[in-house]
Image: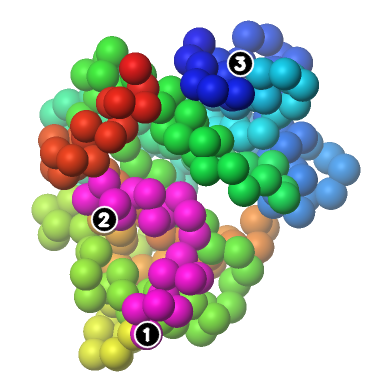
Amino acid sequence: MFSKGRYIAHEARDTQDVNRAQRLRAEVFGRGAEPDADQFDTDFRHMLVEDRDSGALVCCYRFLPLSAGDQIGKSYSAQFYGLETLADFKGPLVEMGRFCIAPGLRDPDILRVAWGAMTRYVDQHGIEMLFGCSSFSGTDAWRYSDTFALLGQRHLAPRHWRPAVKSPEVVPFARMLGRARPDTREAMKRMPPLLKTYLTMGGWVSDHAVVDAEMNTLHVFTGVEIAAIPPARQRLLRAVAQ
């Protein structure tokens, strides 16, 4: 359990907590009245962030600890990306997914507490990489052309970790937009908040986006090597996690 200010983060204690997270996910992802649930929920652990006073669920995400890269095939991301390169990663990893904040809430402390809880977990368990799928709302890739051009030119994964194409429908933005001149302001405006956070930590992305018609999203594989997080950012994260 981790608390800061008016918010408290804790892992799901029972199936009722998991169901609460699934209902919030359904609300955020536009899934209707049915909870957002899949076969991965039983293997993942679930983090909930609540308002201390009201008990309302304001944020949630799920995470899957892996002992090393040779376990990468168990991940949610492995459905969509060829992750054979990461099978050689020797240290412990954590996949994060289904990260969402309750609609209408803009308090930056929610995100700080959510990341503070994960920072504490990373430090306690010696995690060396965080990874997952960063999602863009909708499947119209041209809506995000400035963002994709920026990602392709500045934030691609190192070649030795770069995921291969696996899904049948992808947007190869690095190849398509390699010479485009992105409007940086527009690119940042349309970039998902979670992806922004990853990039401020030195994160990198795949060279293509996957079209996920079921979730009505585009997503890019995203990785953050803990040792590569800029020192100032590490100090900030750990200050929040204290």
Name which residue lies at 41% across and 54% down.
195
| Mark nearer the viewer, 2 or 1 | 1
Tag on residue 204? 2
Q: Which residues are magenta?
A: 183-202
Q: Label 1 near label 2: C-beta < 8 Å? A: no
* Percent x, y of residue 192: 49, 59
- Dot 1 or dot 3: first in sequence order is 3
Tag on residue 12? 3
| Mark nearer the viewer, 1 or 3 | 1
Above or below, comparing residue 32 to residue 117 in the picture: below
Tag on residue 183? 1
Amino acid type at mark 3: Ala
* Percent x, y of residue 206: 31, 61
- Dot 2 or dot 1: first in sequence order is 1
Tag on residue 134? none
Q: Say if residue 219 shows up in the picture.
A: yes
Based on the displayed image, in which of its 4 quarters is residue 19 positioned? top right
Above or below, comparing residue 230 to residue 16 in the picture: below
Helix, strand or loop for the magenta stretch, by majority: helix
- Dot 3 or dot 2: first in sequence order is 3
Above or below, comparing residue 57 to residue 179 in the picture: above
Q: Quadrant of the C terminus?
A: top left
Q: Residue furthest right?
A: 33
Q: CA distance from mark 3 to mark 2?
A: 29 Å
Amino acid type at mark 1: Asp
Q: Residues within 10 Å of mark 3 (few under 14, many from 20)?
A: some
Amino acid type at mark 2: Trp
Q: Residues within 10 Å of mark 2 (few under 14, many from 20)?
A: many
Q: Residue furthest front?
A: 5
Judged from the image, the secondary structure of the residue bearing numbered disc 2 is strand
* Percent x, y of residue 49: 60, 26
Judged from the image, the secondary structure of the residue bearing numbered disc 1 is loop
